[in-house]
Amino acid sequence: MSQEIKKIALLTGGGDCPGLNAVIRAVTRTAILQYGYEVIGYKFGYRGLYNNDFVPLTLESVSGIEHKGGTILYSSNKDNLFDYLVNEDGKMVKKDVSDVAVENMKKEGVDVLVVIGGDGTLTSARDFSRKGVNVIGVPKTIDNDLAATDVTFGFNTAISIATEALDRLHTTAESHHRVMLLEVMGRNAGWIALESGIAGSADVILLPEIPYDINKIVEKIEDRKKHGKPFSIIVVAEGAKSKDGEVVVAKIVEDSPDPIRLGGIGNKLAGDIEKIIKENEVRCTVLGHLQRGGTTSTFDRILSTRYGVAAADLIKEGKFGNMVCLKGDVISCETLENVIGANKNVNPDGELVTVARKIGISFGD
Amino acid sequence: MSQEIKKIALLTGGGDCPGLNAVIRAVTRTAILQYGYEVIGYKFGYRGLYNNDFVPLTLESVSGIEHKGGTILYSSNKDNLFDYLVNEDGKMVKKDVSDVAVENMKKEGVDVLVVIGGDGTLTSARDFSRKGVNVIGVPKTIDNDLAATDVTFGFNTAISIATEALDRLHTTAESHHRVMLLEVMGRNAGWIALESGIAGSADVILLPEIPYDINKIVEKIEDRKKHGKPFSIIVVAEGAKSKDGEVVVAKIVEDSPDPIRLGGIGNKLAGDIEKIIKENEVRCTVLGHLQRGGTTSTFDRILSTRYGVAAADLIKEGKFGNMVCLKGDVISCETLENVIGANKNVNPDGELVTVARKIGISFGD
Amino acid sequence: MSQEIKKIALLTGGGDCPGLNAVIRAVTRTAILQYGYEVIGYKFGYRGLYNNDFVPLTLESVSGIEHKGGTILYSSNKDNLFDYLVNEDGKMVKKDVSDVAVENMKKEGVDVLVVIGGDGTLTSARDFSRKGVNVIGVPKTIDNDLAATDVTFGFNTAISIATEALDRLHTTAESHHRVMLLEVMGRNAGWIALESGIAGSADVILLPEIPYDINKIVEKIEDRKKHGKPFSIIVVAEGAKSKDGEVVVAKIVEDSPDPIRLGGIGNKLAGDIEKIIKENEVRCTVLGHLQRGGTTSTFDRILSTRYGVAAADLIKEGKFGNMVCLKGDVISCETLENVIGANKNVNPDGELVTVARKIGISFGD
Amino acid sequence: MSQEIKKIALLTGGGDCPGLNAVIRAVTRTAILQYGYEVIGYKFGYRGLYNNDFVPLTLESVSGIEHKGGTILYSSNKDNLFDYLVNEDGKMVKKDVSDVAVENMKKEGVDVLVVIGGDGTLTSARDFSRKGVNVIGVPKTIDNDLAATDVTFGFNTAISIATEALDRLHTTAESHHRVMLLEVMGRNAGWIALESGIAGSADVILLPEIPYDINKIVEKIEDRKKHGKPFSIIVVAEGAKSKDGEVVVAKIVEDSPDPIRLGGIGNKLAGDIEKIIKENEVRCTVLGHLQRGGTTSTFDRILSTRYGVAAADLIKEGKFGNMVCLKGDVISCETLENVIGANKNVNPDGELVTVARKIGISFGD
């Protein structure tokens, strides 16, 4: 017997991503206008659920947020209520506090929880589903590395920003006959580097999925020089690794006299390449947080809105335990049980990599 | 027995569209780097084919064009060599001059003709194919109204520009409590209005596919006022029509004392709505040519590059008479015979219209 | 004896303009943080002053508005309390209701009125000053046509948008060998056309200050063709006029069967030029409201902030009856008595016009 | 007796800067169209002058470059022909080779040399002037730190890019309650940090001219938390220094096992602040080369064009040994003898810093 839905709650977890607000707006508007639900939003992801810290979401409060990056519900990166750090008798210990969350929802009369987040956040969503909570998932991954969905919001904005950065670096590279590197997001999956590299006319693209040999990179640079192009553009995913298996991540050296932050793979490679090619200066720019902020792209606003409406529809249909997704150009859904942990990496033999190779882009392999 | 390909030719026909140059670049690079073809480009579409007016396309000549709108090969809108206006004994008459074109290709040793264009341009491509010319088609329609392909390049750039325009109109609408209309492209298919309307938070979207009733539009405006929103944004496709079947197109009134240009449906509606609602000013902006120029969006650069590489691959595979297309996220092809004349309109009951309705957008119906 | 200031009020009048919100924010923050004033904002310009319709302005309410176009205080275009349309015994009559306004300020304890507006709005400000109200003016004119100040906010945003539009039109003009016109704001002063024309590489610039001869325009187009440039870009101020003194403004033809809006000078010229040159298509885009909305440019944010702080400083110094202005790179002030009605037109012999002519731009004269 | 000018040469030196191409275009067009000069451009700054490596500059070759960053003449950073590294008998030695340059100009019939560059490049220009060469200078400094001119091109583009970056960081900072730092250019002068900080609503601005105390920065962050703003934005010039006089510059550590690049002041500060405030994450983004590339802003295009025309006019007037400059809104000139070495730093008591302080921005002092 299906319970009647009266009130739903939203939360956003993990790193922020352009499109979150458009999802929040679309769920809220559809829920109120079409289905007459009351809507609230927990603040800071699961932490707000634990602390019963929420705001009402109304037509007014979600007005004018569609194009803004970030999330009006705030987010936290690491909170997992099934293994949560709490203060017990003055000591911080890890405990399963999910019952508190369930109790909070009951007290507030929340019938359904809509969780917008990445793999970690959705794992908790699945666990709440297993506990009997009515959960709907909405996938969020700026890296586009979720197997269950063809594309997620935020990715188009991210590659657009990275492409614009590559456009900018081109003018300086050409004027000074430099090699310019751009380090972009992508610890495990190189989608951002791959797509922005194709769009931004990179000469070399380095991905976690295709280990590079620095000599091959230099070869490409030298080959371009021979053909009258004494400058090169390299886009490198932060998780790119060499054939030797070396991975370089930006980090803080704590035991130095001053706490210093070392550059990541982009800066490392810039130094290494400059040592080999000598004649040309090599410079690296780390795009960092600029990739995830600001105005949401048109593509992402539409996709987020479709996801949001679909999430509200799933509630109406009682399809709990599911996550919305996009297959081809069709919005559908998958069970949370199936989607957790299923990542999508760049296929080194796939169409996009092949396209890039055919127009002459090197992957340093 | 398959003929060996040595030389290919490209041409672009119809209205310009962001992404054309990225297609030209990708075909040329793949043809030269992968398959060793020689490449030329006819200027001004079929007119250049008739006049044997062409330029060599080299790695150098297609360098740095990927992000630029327009077409380095130029384009003409109306030239059809099967029914071409020629000067014969001082009179302009229409003739089939396609044999001249075939002859020109033979003389230059052109083995394959790659035609990048819309329905009209591709109809001629099919006709050349029927004459035995090796033809490959690449679809171009900024309106996104070709049935054979899910998306075409240029469309994402166009809706991004239209969405940015809607963002701008919002601030003025709100500050002055105005009704602001934006007229966008879409004579027969309302895709640009629909998608930019969703992304740009329009309150009303008017499409050729969903005839409107002006009273319903006014109702929506008044309803918003009652809910504390004394301003509204309307996006209208140039081909939108009323339930009475009225269509208003911008035109020149030739027999007036001065040749004057009348505004189209957007300006017409602005006047009509203002007469009814009185209290608020109503203003219309016609986006016009701004939708098709400037920098190509990241999405369109990638799609164009994929199309271009696929076109070169079809040549290598000898699959003449085909057009490249995108199905879901997969690049494939269709025969030109099948694709001609098959348009794709907005489905009034489809997912996107439904999504828009669910978040409260009115279609004036 | 100088009265102690406790409470100040702001209002914005006339057409909206990027930078208004940054002024509001800077006045409010400086007034509260530096001088301990209470701040309110009248809504819809003088209308709110008459209706005693206002909102408190606090650090919180002006947070995050600096970059947004429009005005959070709303604006009205035509309200003049010294000649105001009121309902008297069922009839609408014009009356001087300025005493009501003064009374309202007294009741609320408003010590100073900060008026942000153009020539019309500031004329009323001067009149209130003459009545003994403590008034500070902040100039607002997107057309940049106020003599008392070198530059005003909004202008840089407007020319940036117009320049981007010209960039976009270039690709289409070149691809199709077209003549493209862009009609921009500037009824009396041609600054936007002049500066965007220089920045956007226009070939012809038409201003109210330099009457044009259509034959000279055609001459320039033909001359470019002879030099291998079979396309041209023309930017035309909406108030541009021919040597015959003809002025064409967009208007509604009320007595036609349907209320139709005629295009303005841009569309008129497009028709006229096309008739003469024949070979090339001529197209016009009217930029309209897109010039004044959206995100405020960096230049305008800084200038607005300087104006806002200066206005608060003038209050502290008791310099009532003054308007802030920019001379060279120095913020100063002028009395409202002096600035009213003093317009600044483009000098046909000035440096900017001369610069444009020297690089080959024609003014059609 | 004044020599008749027939041929002029241009060169660009130092780091690239948006607007260089617009200067090149304006000088070339004015020189050809108004004064009938022949124009050439030396490649790679003085290096091209030494190697007699040049290209003709024509109306055609400078067409369509106005909006592009970089320089079509290329640039080199360090070449000084009065102290130039040459190979003599297999050894690299420093020599004065300026006579070779003078000889090259004579051979080619170059009557005037237009030098576009920063302090270093213009110092050589002055030295050539002392040797009797007809030299005209055009100032280039993206940092805006030349005393002789109020503003130089490139600066407006740079602060616009930095402001857009700050806008983007805001959404993430707010969503995650983070402290976000943006490191911008400005080794000696903090103009970019100051102006982008005001425009981009920074909470703290750190400049070389105002030494900071980290405790004051933390105080500001904590103060904002108390007032309901648990996030902060800090913009830091790369040359910002602490009251202890500490300066941190990004550098390569050569003797480490791997050549690693240490982050600069921004990353250093992020680490230090995070250690103190604990509760909030602190993140730094280094804008780097993104500040100087891409499309030139409207403001900079106009200023560059004015400079270019003025340089050509100075040639016509025979005013050699001068540099063009902007005073207030007036283009004028100064002798190279006077301008060399005269830098312009941010005045800690000047209007802009005062404006920033009044709206509540902290300088960490």
Image (cartoon, coloured by chain):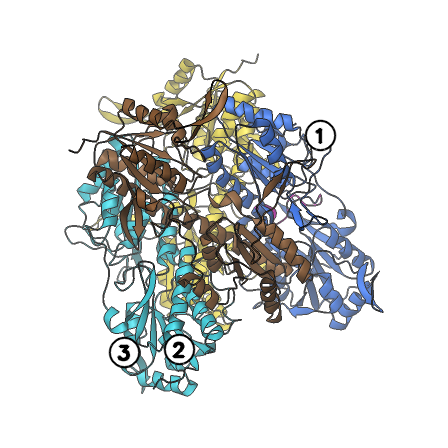
Chain colours: A brown, B cyan, C yellow, D blue
Specify the amino acid type for callout 2.
Gly
Q: Residue C204 placed where, x, y %? A: 48, 59
Specify the amino acid type for callout 3.
Asp
Q: Quadrant of the N terminus of chain C?
A: top right
Name the foreground residue: A226 vs C295.
A226
Helix, strand or loop for disc 3:
helix
Compared to residue C330, the image places residue B300 above or below, namely below
Helix, strand or loop for disc 1:
loop
Magenta highlight range: D147-156
Res B48 label: 2
Q: Report the chain holding disc 3.
A: B
Q: Which residue is mark 1?
A: D243
Q: Which residue is mark 3?
A: B127
Q: Report the chain holding disc 1.
A: D
- Judge from the rendering whether residue D259 lies leftward or rightward of residue A169; answer left or right: right
Q: Report the chain holding disc 2.
A: B
What residue lies at 28% left-to-right and 81% top-to-bottom?
Answer: B93
What residue lies at 36% left-to-right and 22% top-to-bottom?
Answer: C53
Specify the amino acid type for callout 1.
Lys
Q: Is residue C68 magenta?
A: no
Is residue B329 something that shows in the picture? Answer: yes
